[in-house]
Amino acid sequence: MEKFEVTDSRNQVMSVKEWIITMLIMMIPIANIVMLFVWGLGDSGNRNRVNWAKAQLIMFLIMMCLWIFAAVVFGSVFLALFRGEQSDF
């Protein structure tokens, strides 16, 4: 009895050429964000790229939360400093 392996193109390792094309697409403004959602949330496509896009989206969300937190902290510090230094002119 022969053993047949079914190869799924989604499981193949991405070539250097495919990674270079992916990185070039990530350099295009707005298209990069759209493609991250297409690759990360879509069911089709190479699983390496899908997992990479999901990781990029998660890191983007983490960084946005950190930036918002930092903006609130520094904004409140500066607001407190400026309120405390009002002079009588």
Image (cartoon, rainbow, N blue to C red):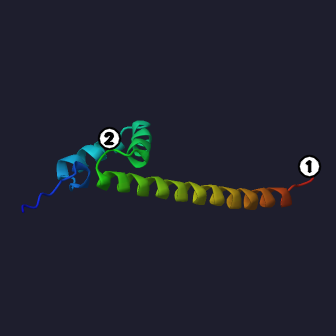
Question: What is the residue that sits farthest to the right in this orientation?
Answer: 88
Residue at horizontal 39 percent and vertical 52 percent from the top: 53
- In this rendering, is residue 28 above or below 85? above
Quick one: label 2, few (<14), some, or many (20+) residues within 10 Å? Answer: some
Q: Classify residue 85 by image quadrant.
A: bottom right
Q: Is residue 79 left or right of residue 66?
A: right
Estimate how packed mark 1 is, as few (under 14), some (14 to 19) or many (20 or more) residues with alpha carbons within 10 Å.
few
Residue type beneath disc 1: Phe
The Cα–Cα distance between marks 1 and 2, rounded to whole angstroms, is 56 Å
Residue 47: x %, y % from top left: 31, 54
Q: Residue 5 at x, y = what percent?
A: 14, 58
Amino acid at pointer 2: Ile
Identify which residue, 65 or 42, lies in the foreground: 42
Mark 1 touches mark 2? (CB < 8 Å): no
Q: Is 31 on the left or on the right of 79, as rendered?
A: left
Q: Which residue is mark 1?
A: 89
Residue shown at the point (43%, 39%) measured from the top left: 34
Q: Is residue 27 left or right of residue 9?
A: right
- Please identify the residue farthest to the left as the structure is shown: 1
Choose mark 1 or mark 2, whichever is in front.
2
Q: Which residue is pictured at 70% across the width and 61% down the height?
A: 73
Secondary structure under the numbered disc 2 in the rendered image: helix
> Image quadrant for the N terminus?
bottom left
Find numbered disc 1 in the image and state the secondary structure of the residue it sits on.
Answer: loop
Can you give x and y, in whole percent of width and height, for residue 42 in the image?
40, 44
Question: In this image, 9 relative to 82: left or right?
Answer: left
Please tell me in which quadrant of the rendered image residue 13 appears: bottom left
First of labels 1, 2 by sequence position: 2
Q: Which mark is residue 25?
A: 2
